[in-house]
Image (cartoon, grey):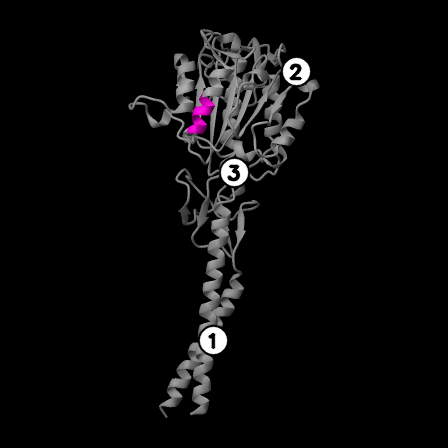
Amino acid sequence: MKLVNIFQILALLFTAVYAATTDNIEDQEQQQITNFINTNDGHTNNWAVIISTSRFWFNYRHMANALSMYRTVKRLGIPDSQIILMLSDDIACNPRNAFQGEVFNNADRQLELYGDNIKVDYRGYEVTVENFIRLLTDRWPKEQPRSKRLLTDENSNIFIYLTGHGGDEFLKFQDAEEISSYDIADAFEQMYEKKRYNEIFFMIDTCQANTMYSKFYSPNIISCGSSALHESSYSHHSDVEIGVAVIDRFTYFTLEFLENITTTSTSTLNDLFDFYTFEKIHSNVGISTDLFDRDPKDVLITDFFGNVQKTVIDEPTEDYIYVYDGDKEDYEDDEPVVVKIIDSNVREIKKNVTESNNVIKLSNKQNSGLLSSFALLGSVIAAFALAYSKF
C-alpha cells in the first residue's frame, strides 16, 4: 500500500507542476502580447492629411508633390481610410498634358502617380480654406460622409503635408483665398481641446514656409518647412515634353530619403532633418520642436509615415506570433493564416515572415512538449497506481 501511495503522490505532483507551469507560460505570453500592442508611445493609429492648394497647369509640380507623399504613406502602410487627399485634380486630364491620364514626378517618367489606386477625397473647388478647417476640427453638418472626415482621437498621430504658393504667414488656396498661420494654429488648438490628436507632424513646401508654423501654440506639434522668411521654395527640374517643372526641391529630397524607409526601419525624424542641406534645397529648411515633448532622435519615421495596426496570429507558426506591419514584401505568397484582428483595417496577412522587427517570440514548443510528456507520465502513473490498488 505504501508503494501505491508513493505512485499516487508522484502522479499528483507531476500533474500539479504541469498545470502551474502551463498557467505561468500562458500568463507570460498574454502579458508579452499586451505589452507589444501597447508599445506605440501613446498612439494607436496614424493618419495623413495631404493637400495641394494650387490649381492650373503651370502648378503641375504641386499636384506631383502631393501625389508623391500620398504614395509614400500608402506604401508604408497607412490605408486610404486614414488618408485625406485634397487636390485641384486638373492636371492628369488637362488638354496640355502630353501623357493623358498620367502624372509624373521625374523627367524619366518611371513612376506614374495618377493610377487606378488613388482616392481623392476633395477635388477641384472643394479644396477650400473652410473645408480644411472643418476637416481639422471635425465641425461638419450631419450629412457629411465619414469617408471625408478626419476621424482621429487622442491616440492618433497625424501627418499634415501642404504644398502650394505662400508668403509671410499665409498660404494661398486655389488662387482665390488665403489661410493664415493664425487660422491653422487656432484649428490645432481646437483639435487639442477636443482630444483629436496625440502628436502632429506638420510639413509645408511653399515660399516662406517656415512662417506658417510660427504662431502654433498647442502641445505635441513638430513642424518642418522648406524655406525661411523672405526665401523662395524652388522647383527641382522640368520635363521638356511636359513643359513645366514636375516636382519641388524640398519634396524631391524628402522623397529621396523616404524611399529608403521600410515599415521596419529604425530611422528617425532627426535623420530626416539632418538629410536636408542648403546645397540640396537651395533654401533654409526650418524645424520647430519647441512644442514637442519628444526628442526627434527618439521619433521613428514610421511614427507618422507608417501604420501601427496590430494583428496577432491565434495559432503561432512554430514558436512565434507575427504582427502585420503593412509591408507586403515581408511576407511570402503562401496560404493566409487564421488571425485575430486587433485593427479592423487589416485586409490580408501572409505567414512565414522573412524579416521583421514586429515579431514576438513565445514559449518554445520543445518546453511545452516536455511538459506534456510529464503530464502524460503522471497520468500513466496514476492509472497504474489505481489498477495496482485493486489487486
Q: Position of residue 316 (x, y in %)?
A: 47, 54
Depicted 355 relative to depicted 182: above or below = below
Between 300 and 367, the one nearer to me in the picture = 300
| For residue 125, side relative to residue 67 (left or right) | left
Question: Which residue is label 2 attached to?
Answer: 283
Q: Determine the secondary structure under disc 1.
A: helix
Q: CA distance from mark 3 to mark 1?
A: 45 Å
Q: Within 10 Å of the Cα at label 1, are there few (<14), some (14-19), or many (20+) other Cα atoms? A: some
Question: Taking the image as drawn, is residue 83 in sight?
Answer: no
Between discs 1 and 2, the one toward the N terminus: 1
The residue type indicated by label 2 comes to: Ser
Q: CA distance from mark 1 to mark 2?
A: 73 Å
- Which numbered disc, 3 or 1, marks the residue closer to the eye? 1
The residue type indicated by label 1 comes to: Phe
> Which secondary structure dominates the residues rendered in magenta?
helix
- The answer to whether the residues at label 2 and label 3 have Cβ atoms under 8 Å apart is no
Magenta range: 187-193
Which corner quadrant holds the N terminus? bottom left
Question: Which residue is label 1 attached to?
Answer: 14
Between 26 and 352, the one nearer to me in the picture = 26
Between 370 and 229, the one nearer to me in the picture = 229
- Which numbered disc, 2 or 3, marks the residue closer to the eye? 2
Residue 166 image-quadrant placement:
top right
Q: Position of residue 5 (x, y in %)?
A: 43, 87
The residue type indicated by label 3 comes to: Asp
Q: Is residue 192 magenta?
A: yes
Q: Tell me which residue sits at (60%, 31%) in the image.
A: 269
Question: Which residue is label 3 attached to?
Answer: 327
